[in-house]
């Protein structure tokens, strides 16, 4: 239930604070007095669309704050959204709207916590339901009518709708996979040819060792310098092991050094470790000499092998230019495209298999949609009888109403096209509601529809914006009684011009425009502030003020006959309320 509404700089409202009560809350006033602005403010607080026009001229910021009573389900939902509870009894929703040079910005808060549009949508669904004659367009929209019927159908129907949505998502994925495969078949074949060629080329190159190119480079250097290596190895051999010239080799010098140290050790054993070092050095030098000699003897020119190495180096460089730039990267690319080629050749992803998969998922979607249609047909029959029962007291005793459900291609919402058909005159065929219902009939239909919904789901606060436009007399009285009936289960806010409706109110507000002088000579955004129009709201909390307002609604002035009529309305409303509670 909406407890309090605080508004600042919203349209024609500068400052306003309203306290609402349980039951039927009515807003009356002259046409254009600003009654709908208050409902627009409630809508804005709950995340409704706004434009720069909602910000009061001469200001750059508007604010709306609405305080609602809380309940256990709402408190649990807020906890799920990680929003702290202020207390167990209330929740505060606010929205700040600011204007910039190029656009407007708004920030919404729940209990002081910044929230996004999705959370605000969840709050709105749990707190308020707004009904206006503008919903005539919605009544003609199959999607909106379908949502209303599904809501009326209850949890079992909504659960089946969720199954249909899941099934449709699965089918859609299979369908898109098939279409993607069909449209990309040419590209797939081209890619298949390319990868096949590349795999064959890289496979033929027999790539296995990332360092092969460096190793081949070293081998090429050796083969190109065989003679030089032979000559140098022989020089090393002579220097270390056996010199053909008079100059002694290093091995001979170390032998002489060993003999001398051996004699010295006989006189001083401390030199023994030096003797051992010389002996080790001599052994190492002699071993190097033997190995370098064997190395030199083993060297021989091999033009054929050199040619093979050169060809292999050129082959690997070509591979690197195409798939590298390094041999390591070329090998990695080879390994990757082998996997890609396997996927392209995967028989499980053939068009035929994808077609079979799509067909199977479509059959499951069709089955789920058929079950949803059955539940909708059951809900439609129930809604038809209930809605007719609600319309009869609204001076529509001969009305006929049928929910037409026609087959359509399955979507996430099922396979039904739903239309409300209607006939208010005997002998006239059922036709789409929006094509044959008058304004007054549409008002009563919407009211009856909300009355049906209230029997299966308590909305909390129901808002009706001039739902009684275009009716009078007996019909207006029936609407008043229906609104009062709804207010026994829900808080009802109603903007009305009908004295019959206003008389039934538990809480009555009069809305009017006033001209004020905020500050002589002051200007804001080139607006002369000497005189400004503002919306003011008066709570009519005593019998005299209510009687005066009802007289104004009935007769346009407080004449004696209008006052008498107003008194009769208040008495009639009081008797009706007493009759309901006896």
Image (cartoon, rainbow, N blue to C red):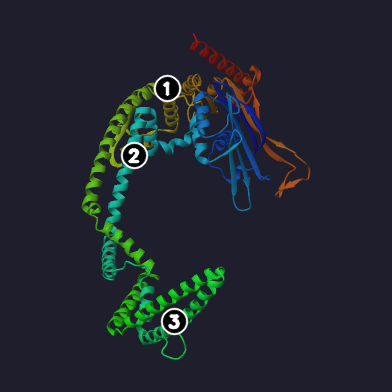
Q: Secondary structure at mark 1?
A: helix
Residue at horizontal 34%, vertical 77%?
Answer: 313
Q: Nearer the viewer, residue 290 or 185?
A: 290
**Tag shown at residue 455:** 1
Q: Nearer the viewer, residue 248 or 184?
A: 248
Report how far apart the C-alphas of labels 3 and 2 lie in the structure.
87 Å
Mark nearer the N terminus (3 vs 2):
2
Q: Nearer the viewer, mark 2 or mark 1?
A: 2
Residue 194, position as x, y percentages in the image:
28, 67
Mark nearer the N terminus (3 vs 1):
3
Residue 86, position as x, y percentages in the image:
60, 28
Please identify the quarter of the rendering in which residue 536 is found. top right
**Tag shown at residue 240:** 3
Report how far apart the C-alphas of labels 3 and 1 lie in the structure.
113 Å
Q: Does residue 375 appear to the left or right of 286 in the view shown? A: left
Report how far apart the C-alphas of labels 2 and 1 lie in the structure.
29 Å
Q: Name the quadrant of the N terminus.
A: top right
Q: How many C-alpha atoms fall within 10 Å of the one at disc 2: few (<14), some, or many (≥20)?
A: some
Which residue is at the far bottom? 246
């Amino acid at each position: 239930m909406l407890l309090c509404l605080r508004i600042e700089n919203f349209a024609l409202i500068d400052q306003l604070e309203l306290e609402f009560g349980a039951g039927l809350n009515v807003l009356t006033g002259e046409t254009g007095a600003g009654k709908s602005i208050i409902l627009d403010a409630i809508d804005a607080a709950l995340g409704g669309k706004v434009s720069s026009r909602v910000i009061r001229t001469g200001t750059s910021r508007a604010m709306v704050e609405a305080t609602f009573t809380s309940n256990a389900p709402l408190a649990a939902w807020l906890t799920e959204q990680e929003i702290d509870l202020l207390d167990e009894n209330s929740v505060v929703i606010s929205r700040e709207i600011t204007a910039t040079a190029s656009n407007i910005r708004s920030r919404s808060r729940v209990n002081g916590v910044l929230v996004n549009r999705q959370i605000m949508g969840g709050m709105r669904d749990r707190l308020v339901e707004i009904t206006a004659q503008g919903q005539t367009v919605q009544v003609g929209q199959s999607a909106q009518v379908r949502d209303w019927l599904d809501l009326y159908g209850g949890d079992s129907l909504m659960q089946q709708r969720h199954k249909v949505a899941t099934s449709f998502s699965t089918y859609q994925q299979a369908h898109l996979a098939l279409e993607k495969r069909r449209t990309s078949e040419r590209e797939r074949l081209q890619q298949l040819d390319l990868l096949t060629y590349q795999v064959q080329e890289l496979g033929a190159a027999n790539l296995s060792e990332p360092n092969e190119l460096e190793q081949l480079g070293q081998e090429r250097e050796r083969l190109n310098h065989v003679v030089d290596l032979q000559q140098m190895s022989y020089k090393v051999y002579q220097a270390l092991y056996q010199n053909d010239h008079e100059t002694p080799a290093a091995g001979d010098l170390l032998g002489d050094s060993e003999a001398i140290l051996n004699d010295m050790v006989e006189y001083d054993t401390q030199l023994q470790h030096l003797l051992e070092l010389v002996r080790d050095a001599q052994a190492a030098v002699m071993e190097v000499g033997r190995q370098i000699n064997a190395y030199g003897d083993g060297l021989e020119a091999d033009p054929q092998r050199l040619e093979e190495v050169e060809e292999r180096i050129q082959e690997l460089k070509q591979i690197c230019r195409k798939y590298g730039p390094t041999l390591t990267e070329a090998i990695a690319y080879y390994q990757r495209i082998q996997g890609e080629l396997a996927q392209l050749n995967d028989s499980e992803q053939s068009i035929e298999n994808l077609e079979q998969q799509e067909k199977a998922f479509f059959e499951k979607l069709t089955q789920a949609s058929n079950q949803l249609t059955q539940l909708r047909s059951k809900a439609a029959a129930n809604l038809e009888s209930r809605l007719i029962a609600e319309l009869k007291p609204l001076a529509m005793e001969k009305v006929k109403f049928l929910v037409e459900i026609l087959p359509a291609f399955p979507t996430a919402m099922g396979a039904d096209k739903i239309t409300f058909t209607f006939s208010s005159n005997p002998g006239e065929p059922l036709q789409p509601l929006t094509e044959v219902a008058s304004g007054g009939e549409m008002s009563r239909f919407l009211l009856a529809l909300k009355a049906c919904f209230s029997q299966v789901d308590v909305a909390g606060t129901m808002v009706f914006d001039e739902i009684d436009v275009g009716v009078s007399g007996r019909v207006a009285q029936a609407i008043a009684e229906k609104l009062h009936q709804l207010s026994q289960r829900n808080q009802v806010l109603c903007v009305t011009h009908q004295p019959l409706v206003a008389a039934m109110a538990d809480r009555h507000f009069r809305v009017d425009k006033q001209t004020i002088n905020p500050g002589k000579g002051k200007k804001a955004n080139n607006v002369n502030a000497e005189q400004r129009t503002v919306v003011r709201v008066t709570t009519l909390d005593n019998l005299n003020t209510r009687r005066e307002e009802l007289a104004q609604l009935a007769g346009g002035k407080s004449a004696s006959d209008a006052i008498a009529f107003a008194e009769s309305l208040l008495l009639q409303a009081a008797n009706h309320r007493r009759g309901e509670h006896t």
